[in-house]
Image (spheres, rainbow, N blue to C red):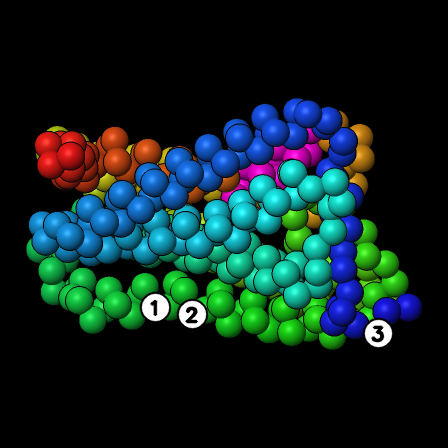
Amino acid sequence: MINSTQGLFFILDAYFDTGLLKYLYFIIVMFLYMLILCSNLLLIVVICVNRSLHEPMYMFLCSLFVNELYGSTGLFPLLLGQILSDIHTVSAAVCLLQTFCLYSYGGVEYLNLAIMSYDRYLAICYPLQYNMQMKSHKIAVLIALTWLYPLIVCICMIFMTSSLQLCGNIINKVYCVNYSVVKLACFDTSVINIYGLITSFGKILGALIFICYTYIKILKVCLLGSKQTRQKAVSTCTPHLASVLNFSVGASFEMLQSRFNMSGVPNMLRIFLSLYFFACPPLFNPLMYGLNLSKIRVTCKNLIANVLRQG
């Protein structure tokens, strides 16, 4: 029996010997991480420095891109180190820190997407009241709430996990997740499991129900509205809906793997599905919004052209 997670190390058991191919995997993952960093940082800079983009929708997008950087940084540095390592161990402190980052990333992402759907709902259904409703202080409060609530929930979760008495240290993943640590506990973990289920489903189902509600209202207005209203809805809502779908698919993969026995699934496929949740949305979202929103697309082109001209 291990008294607690303090002073313990975990073995990440999903890794397998790839020989010299590990250098190829390292280069691929490093390239993916650099692409995520560059694309999200570019859009954050574009939104921050361009005053014409200081509108509610773009402020919420900026928060989303910051979260993509946060989540990917919680995964990739440790992942890159483990790919090159022959011994796939991680200290309890680093494991819990990664768990905190990844879980809070997921919570912030869903709440941010819910707030963005509320913004589109007001802009399309109540265009004359939009500027009165979305004042700067309200935007700041909404963004603060999307970050503070998941962070507080995850702090409580990590505190409960760190006090568990463990009877093992093998995690069958390529990164740390809370449920894998909790399953190693020597005693009954009903309280922390119930807490995890309530907070997880509360954030996910609550956000999805709210998103569905706003889009039902938007669809109703579009069906009864003008062609211009429909075009506006399509241009701004398509990337958002694609982001919600993409992230929900990734979250579903992760929850299924955490809660059910996936030993019958090939190891490489399990690893890919695990990484999808944390790698694809941070890469997918800046590409979607950068290509689909004309203001961002034009501003990015001008910024890159100016940099190349000065270089």
Kindly indicate the quadrant of the structure image that contains residue 193. bottom right
Vertical side of 137 occupied by 14: above or below: above
Secondary element at image label 2 = helix
Nearer to me, 145 or 161:
161
Mark closer to the chain start, 2 or 3: 3
Which one is closest to the eye, mark 1 or mark 3? 3
Q: Name the residue beneath numbered marker 3.
A: 3
* Circle 1 Cα neighbour tier, 10 Å, few/some/many (<14 / 14–19 / ≥20): few
Tags 2 and 1 in contact by the CB under 8 Å rule? yes
Amino acid type, residue under disc 3 in the picture: Asn
Q: What's the magenta region?
A: 268-278
Q: Is residue 148 left or right of residue 4?
A: left
Give the residue at x 33% y 34%: 287
Give the residue at x 69% y 28%: 268
Kindly indicate the quadrant of the structure image that contains residue 166. bottom right
User: Which numbered marker is on residue 148?
Assistant: 2
Q: Is residue 219 left or right of residue 183?
A: left
In terms of secondary structure, what is the magenta stretch mainly?
Answer: helix
In the image as oriented, which residue stretches furthest toward the front? Answer: 311
Q: Name the residue beneath numbered marker 1.
A: 144
Give the residue at x 27% y 49%: 44
